[in-house]
Image: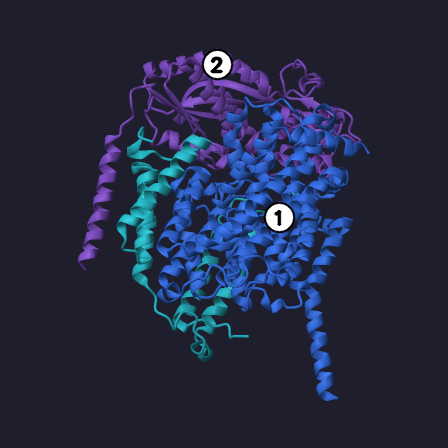
Chain colours: A cyan, B blue, C purple
Amino acid sequence: MKPDTPKSAAGLAIGLGLLLLGGIIFYDASQMQIPPTYAKVGPQAFPYFIALGLAVVGAYFAWNSWTPAARREIAAEGFTTDWRALLIIGAGLLIHLNILKPLGFVIAGVFLFMCIAFAFGSRSFVRDGIVAVILVVLSYVGFTHGLGLQLPPGILAGLL
Amino acid sequence: MDVLASLLQGFATAVTPMNLMWCLLGTTLGTAIGILPGIGPALTIALLLPITAKLDPTGAFIMFAGLYYGAMYGSSTTSILLNTPGESGSIITAVEGNVMAKNGRGAAALATAAIGSFVAGTLGTIAITFLAPLFVKLALLFGPAEYFALMVLAFTTVSALLGLSLSRGITSLLLGLAIGLVGTDVLTGQPRLTFDILSLLRGIDIVVVAVGLFAVGEALYMASRPDMRAGEIVPIRGSIFMTAEEWRRSWKPWLRGTALGFPFGALPAGGTEIPTFLSYFLEKRMSKKPEEFGKGAIEGVAGPEAANNAAVAGVLVPLLTLGLPTSATAAILLAAFEQYNLKPGPLLFSSSSTLVWGLIASLYIGNVMLLILNLPLAGLWVRLLAIPQPLLYGGILLFSTLGVYSLNNSTFDLVLLFLVGILGFLMRRYDFPVAPCIIGLILGRLAEAQFRRALTISQGDATVFFTHPLSLALLIIAALVFVGPLFYRWRAAKLQSAKTAG
Amino acid sequence: MNRRTLIASAVALLLAGGLSLNLASTPALALDELRIIAPAAPGGGWDQTARAMQEAVQSGGAVKAVTVENIPGAGGTVGLAQLAGQEQGKDNVLMVNGLVMVGAILTNKSAVTLENTTPIARLTGEYEVIVVPGSSELKTLADLVAKLKADPGAVAWGGGSAGGTDHILAGLVAKASGADVSKLNYVPFSGGGEALAAVMGGHVVAGISGYSEWEGQIKSGELRALGISAPERVAGIDIPTLKEQGVDVELANWRAIVAPPGLNDEQKKALLATVDAAVKSDSWKKVLAAKNWTDLYLPGDDFTKLVASENARVTEILKGIGLVQ
C-alpha cells in the first residue's frame, strides 16, 4: 500500500479546501429554519454529519502534507502538465455556454468542437470544421425536427 | 397453461410487420439516445408522446418498450469506449469497461455487455411473464424503514470501489454526499446549499455530475497530459470476439446481475443504479482474482450490465400490474397509458390483453433485435477509438454539453458541468477515485430521505429499523458484509502468526 | 505569439458579434409566433397542458408557429423568474402555472411572485382524493377525522412534495375537522409511484393525490377513497365529497395560463382572445375528454381574484403547518 500523501503543497491545498467546504456546509446548515417535524432528525442533521466528515479528511490531508513522508510519494509530479491546453478547453467551455443562446446551438457547437480539437493539438482547421459542421447540423436537425426538442436556434433561426 | 396461451396470442400480435417495424424503430432509437449522455428514455418518450397520440396504442407501446431496453444497451457503449456513461445505470460499467478498452479488449467488453443485457433482458421478461404477482407483493413490503436498511447495505458496497487509498476514497464519497445536499430538502422543502440561486433549488442532476466527472474531467485530464496523449490506443488486441476465458468469466456474473437487478427494478424506489453497485461489489468479492478489479476485470462489466437491464425489466412489473411507476421512464409510460385512456393495474390484463401480451411478446423480440444490432456493431464501435484524439474529444464534449443543456434547457447546468468537470480533473490529477463520489450522490439523497421518512411515520421512534423484520434482516446482512472481511483478515493474520510462532 | 493574438481576437470578435446580434434580434411581429413556457419537465401535468394548448392554438390557424419551452425546477419558480425577467413586456409569450406554484413561491421564498405576471385565464383542474389502503380499519372519512382529532401524529399522510397540493389539502382537512394543524404528520414522497406504494403497502395511514393518478387502484379496490375535494359530486366518480361528510374543504388543483408582466391592455386582450379561441376549439375539447381534465375555464379579472384568494388561503395553511414562517 502506498502512503496516503500527495505532494505537500497540493496536499495542503486539498486539505484546506476540504476544511473550507466542510465549514461552508456547517454554516449553511446552522442558518436553516427548521419546521416542526416528527422525525426529530431535521434537514440540518445530515449536512452536519457530512461537514464533520469533510473536516476530518481535510485535517488529515493538511496534517499529512507537513510530514516528511509526504515528500516521498508525489501524486502530481513526474510528468509535464500542458496548462495551455487546459486553459483553451476551459475558455472554450465558458465561451460556449455564453454564446449558446444568443448565437444558437449550431454556431456555439462548431466553435466548441474546433476549440477542443485545437487544444488537443489539431491544426487541420478545414477537416475539423467540416466534421464539426456535419456533426452539429445533423444533431440539431435530428433533435429539433425528429424529437421536438428545443435547441436554441440563435441567429440562424429559420435557416435550419 | 393460461399464461402460455396468452403469450402465444401476444406473439401473434407482435410479429405483424407493422409492430415489428415499431419494435425495430424503438430499439434503434433507444440505442442512439442511450449513447448520448443526458438524453435518456424518459425525456425521449415524453417528447414522442404528442407525436404518437394518433398511433395505435399497441404499436406505440412496443416502440416505447424497445426504446427503454435499447437505451440501456446503448449507454454501455460510451461508458466502455469513451469513459462517458450515457445513463446513470452504466456508470459502474465505465470503471472496468474503459480500462478493458484501453487494453485493447473493448470489443470483448462491449460483447459481454450486449450478451449480458440480452440474458438479463430475456430472463427478466420471463420473470414478468410468470412471476409478476410474486414480485408485486415483495415491492409493497418495502416501506421507508426497509428502504433505509437497503441503502445501508448498498453503502457497504462502496468499499469495493474505494481504490487503493482509504482516505481518498472516503473523501470522494463525502464530496458526492455534499453535492447531493444541494437543492430543496424533500421532507421540509427547505433550501440547502443553494446560496439564493434559484436554479440550484432543483438540485444538481446526477447526469450533470456523471458527465462532468467522467467526460469533461477525462477530457481536461487527457489534454493536460501530453505524455498520455502520445501513447496510441490499439483498438483490438488479440481476438475481436470474447475468448473462451472471457466467456467462462462472464456467464455467472450475467446470472447474478440479473438476480440482483430484477427485484430492484420492481421496488418502487429501487432504480437501475443501486443493483449495478451491488453487482460490482458481489463480483469483486466472489472473484478469485479480486486484484484484477480496477485493471479491467470482465466480471465488472458483465455483472452490472446484466443488472441494469434486468432492473429495466423489473420496472415493468409494478407498472403493468399495479399501475405503479417506479422510475422516471415508468412515470412517462404511465402518462402514455393515460393518453390512450388505459389504466394500468390489475384490470389492464383483462381489459386490454392484446396490448399487454403483445407488449410482453415484443420485449422478447426486442431483446433479440438488440443483440443482433449490438453484437456485430461491437467490432465497429471499437474503431471509435481509432478516431484522432482531437476529433474524438471534440465530439465527446459537444454531445456532453448538448445532453446536459437539454436536461433543463438551461445554460446554468452548463456552468455546473464546467465546475464539476474541474473537480473531476483535480480528482484524476491527485489520484482520487471518482466512482465513490457518484455513489455518494445517488445513495446519500435516498438514504437520508428514507431515514427521515421512516422516523416521521414512527413519530421519532428509532427502533422501527429493528422491529420491522425485513429492515432488521437487511441491516444484519449489511453488518456481515462489513464485518466479514475484517474478521477474515483478523483470522488470516492470526493463522499467519500462529504459523510463524509454530 | 502570433497565433495567440489571432485566437484572442477571434474570440473577442465572436463575443462582440454575439452581443450585437443578440440585441438586433428583437421579437418578431406579434403572434407571428407564440412561445408557451412549461415550467416543468416534459411529461408532467403542466407540460401536457402546454402541449395541448399548443395544439389548440395551432388548430385555429391564428398563429403561425407555436412552440413549447420546458424550464423545470423548484415548483415552477425557475420558469416564473424567467417570465418576469427576460420575457418582461413580450406579448408573444405565455406560461402555464397552477396551484402548486402558489405553494412553491411561498416555500421557496421566491422573490418573484404571481403578482409579477399578467394573469390570462384558469384552464383546467383536478380534484384530490383522500384514500386509505383497502384493508384499513378506517371505513369512512368520519373514522379518519376521529383518529386525527384524537392524535394528529398517529395519522401519517403520504403524498407529493412538501408544500404541494396534497400537503395543502391535508392541512385544510386537519384544520376544518378541528385538529391541531401544527401537529400534522405529513410524509412527502418524491414521485406519485412511491407515495402510492407506501399507501398500498400500508406504510402510511392515509394518502392524498389527484383523482386520476390513483383512479385504477381505487376502482380495483386496492385503495378505498374516503372523499373527494370537489364542491359537489363529480359525474362518473362514485366518491362522496368532503363537504357532504361535514369537512368543509374544497380544493381544485387548478392549472392556468399567464403572460409576462408589463403588457398594456391591448396586448393583454389580444392574448386573452387567442387563448379564448383555443379553449373553444374542438382540439382542446378532445384533449379534455381524453385526459379526463375538468374544464375550469375562468378568464380575465375573475381569475385574478381567484389567484389572490388562493394565495391567502395557501399562505395561512402553510404557516399553520410551519413550512412558511
Q: Amino acid at mark 2?
A: Val
Q: Is residue C43 left or right of residue C188?
A: left
Q: Closer to the observer: label 1 or label 2?
A: 1
- Residue B450 showing in the rendered view: no
Q: Position of residue A120 (x, y in %)?
A: 33, 57
Residue C323: name its quadrant: top right
- In-image side of B239 versus C117 (left or right): right
Dot 2: chain letter: C
Question: Residue B117 — which label?
Answer: 1
Residue farthest to the right, as pictured: B1
The residue singled out by tag 2 in the image is: C279
Relative depth, front residue between C269 and B42:
B42
Residue positioned 58% across, 29% down in the render: C165
Residue B15: % across, % down: 65, 31
Q: Secondary structure at mark 1?
A: helix
The image position of residue B159, as x and y in percent, is: 61, 62
Residue at the spot 60% in from the left edge and 69% down from the top edge: B291
